[in-house]
Image (spheres, helix red, strand yellow):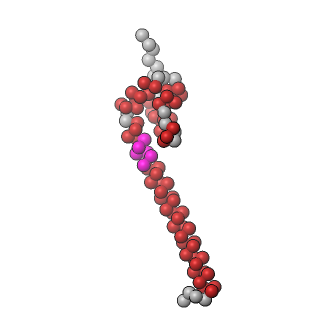
Amino acid sequence: MPTLRRFDHEAAYQFWANQPSPCRSYIQVAEEFGVSDVAIGKAARREKWHRRVRSKDIAAERKLMRRVLHVRMEQFRSAMEAAQIRGLRDGSDQ
C-alpha cells in the first residue's frame, strides 16, 4: 500500500497562488511539496483554490487599475498645467 505523504495545504495553496496566472501548475506544487499532482488536485478542489485565487486576482487587478488611473490623472493634470503656462506665455489665455 502506498505511503501517504502529508503536506501543508495552505502553504501549497500560497505557492500555487503566487505564481503568475498563466503559469500556475499543480505539477509544480506537487514537485515543490514532494507529493503527487493528484494529491494537490484533490486538496485544490476540496479547498476551492480556484475560487480563492480568483478573488485574489480580482483584488490585485483593481489595485493595479487604481494605480494606473492615478498616474493617468497626474499626467493629465501636468499636461493641463503646461498648456495653461504656454497660454499665459503666449498671451492667448485670459
Q: Is residue 70 magenta?
A: no
Q: Is residue 11 visible?
A: no
Residue closer to the observer: 26 or 35: 26
Quadrant of the drawing holding the C terminus:
bottom right
Place residue 41 in its image quadrant: top left
Q: In this picture, which residue range is highlighted in magenta? A: 53-58
Q: Is residue 15 above or below residue 31?
A: below
Image position, residue 93 (x, y; %): 56, 87
Image position, residue 34 (x, y; %): 52, 23
Q: Is residue 83 above or below residue 68?
A: below
Q: Is residue 56 magenta?
A: yes
Residue at x 47%, y 58% (from the top left corner): 66
Q: In this view, does 46 lie above or below 55?
A: above
Residue at x 45%, y 14% (from the top left corner): 3
Q: Please state the total of marks drawn on the protein image.
A: 0
Dominant secondary structure (helix, strand or loop) of the stretch shown in magenta = helix
Quadrant of the drawing holding the N terminus:
top left
